[in-house]
Image (spheres, rainbow, N blue to C red):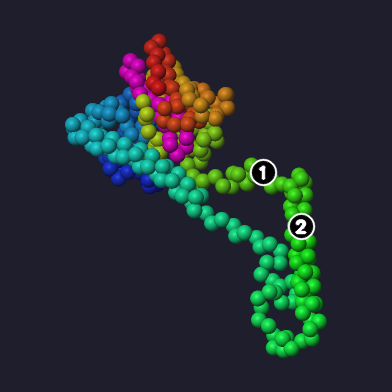
């Protein structure tokens, strides 16, 4: 059984190449992921994400791996810089894809064909007999003089019948407007849900459905997310992570220690319920050096604030 799982198909080739290089270094060292975590000071869960292509390894982790494996740090740093640019390209593509999807949906909605108008009763059909302007049948001019008096009477009868039909239709329409059962029914939630746009492959939630859920498990992290702002508290990096496709944000801390806490809070109206506007994350395992919160619903990239309270007593916020 292979040691490494296949990298995500949507991963940028430049980033995938760098992850493969990290895997080769770990393989040549003969160390397990747990041993790499222990020797570099970065948690095992973090290294599993770095080596799985789900998260770009921070520069500090890359330099620590170079020291552990005896690799030239300058060469590995150059590879990391290329990978970081690839990661940012992925974030830009994700933003562009989301915008293109919204434009395409708007265009489809504006060009949808209108339903054909219903024909009025009797339109295009004769209500018995000839209509004015029809060709006169052969021999009609030779009829008796009394026929000329009967024809106007027939026309008057036909007009009276047509008028009765029109008045009846008007009465039915006005009566129908007064009847509650004749009014168009509002869309049921099920019908409205069926018109929601399909999510990209691997993404399992969007908007309010993401509130309180793990961004990695729901497919909102990795290349589908970007860091909108960050701050360093002591040696710990505090980040606001945002996913355009999921319309959600969460907090993350890197280079953290056991007991460190991170909190994300919605600071702009987003439609989330009150109990879903604040989420917390903790570093519980001494082997881990990062942590992230569940997601909150935000209306845009600037809709969340992330704060960290470290076990050392330091604290700070990024918004």
For marks 1 and 2 on the same chain, the one whose residue lies earlier in the sequence: 2
Instruction: Indicate left or right for 138 with 31 as reference.
Output: right
* Residue in the picture at 35% in, 24% down: 230
Q: Position of residue 217 (x, y in %)?
A: 48, 37
CB atoms of marks 1 and 2 within 8 Å: no
Query: In the image, is residue 131 part of the stretch drawn in magenta?
Result: no
Segment colored magenta = 230-251
Residue 58: x, y in percent? 31, 29
Label 2 CA crowd tier, 10 Å (few <14, some 14–19, many 20+): few
Quadrant in which residue 25 is drawn? top left
Quarter occupied by the C terminus:
top left
Camera-side residue of 194 and 309: 194
**Residue picked out by circle 1:** 186
Counting from the top left corner in percent of width and height, residue 20 is at 29, 42
- 256 or 127, which is in the foreground? 127
Q: Secondary structure at mark 1?
A: loop
Q: Which mark is residue 285?
A: none
Question: Label 2: which residue?
Answer: 167
Look at the image and say whether residue 233 sits in the magenta stretch: yes
What separation in Å lies between label 1 and label 2 (alpha carbons)?
Answer: 30 Å
Q: Note whether residue 277 is visible.
A: yes
How many dots with numbers? Answer: 2
Residue at 80 percent of width and 77 percent of height: 150
Decide: is 307 above or below 134.
above
- Determine whether 82 is above or below 35 in the image: below
Label 2 residue SS = helix
Dominant secondary-structure state across the stretch colored magenta: strand
Q: Residue at x 54, y 34 (%)?
A: 208
Left or right, 31 with reference to 109: left
């Amino acid at each position: 059984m292979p040691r490494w799982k296949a990298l995500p198909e949507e991963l940028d080739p430049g980033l995938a190449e760098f992850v493969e290089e990290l895997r080769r270094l770990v393989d040549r060292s003969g160390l397990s992921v747990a041993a790499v975590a222990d020797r570099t000071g970065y948690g095992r869960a973090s290294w599993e994400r770095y080596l799985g292509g789900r998260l770009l390894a921070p520069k500090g982790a890359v330099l620590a791996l170079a020291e552990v494996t005896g690799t030239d740090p300058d060469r590995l740093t150059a590879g990391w810089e290329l990978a970081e640019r690839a990661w940012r390209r992925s974030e830009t593509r994700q933003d562009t894809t989301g915008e293109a999807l919204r434009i395409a949906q708007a265009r489809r909605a504006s060009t949808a064909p209108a339903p054909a108008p219903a024909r009025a009763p009797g339109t295009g059909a004769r209500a018995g007999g000839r209509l004015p302007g029809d060709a006169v049948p052969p021999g009609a001019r030779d009829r008796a003089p009394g026929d000329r008096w009967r024809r106007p009477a027939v026309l008057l009868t036909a007009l009276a019948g047509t008028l009765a039909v029109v008045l009846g239709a008007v009465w039915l329409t006005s009566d129908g407007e007064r009847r509650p059962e004749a009014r168009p029914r509002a869309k049921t939630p099920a019908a409205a849900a069926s018109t929601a746009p399909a999510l990209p492959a691997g993404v399992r939630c969007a908007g309010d459905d993401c509130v309180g859920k793990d961004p990695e498990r729901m497919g909102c992290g990795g290349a589908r997310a970007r860091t909108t702002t960050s701050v360093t508290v002591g040696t710990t990096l505090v980040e606001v992570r945002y996913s355009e496709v999921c319309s959600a944000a969460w907090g993350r801390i890197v280079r953290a220690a056991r007991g460190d806490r991170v909190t994300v809070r919605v600071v702009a109206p987003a439609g989330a319920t009150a109990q879903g506007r604040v989420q917390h994350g903790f570093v519980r395992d001494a082997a881990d050096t990062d942590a992230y919160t569940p997601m909150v619903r935000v209306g845009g990239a600037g809709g969340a604030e992330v704060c960290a309270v470290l076990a050392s007593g330091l604290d700070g916020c990024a918004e």
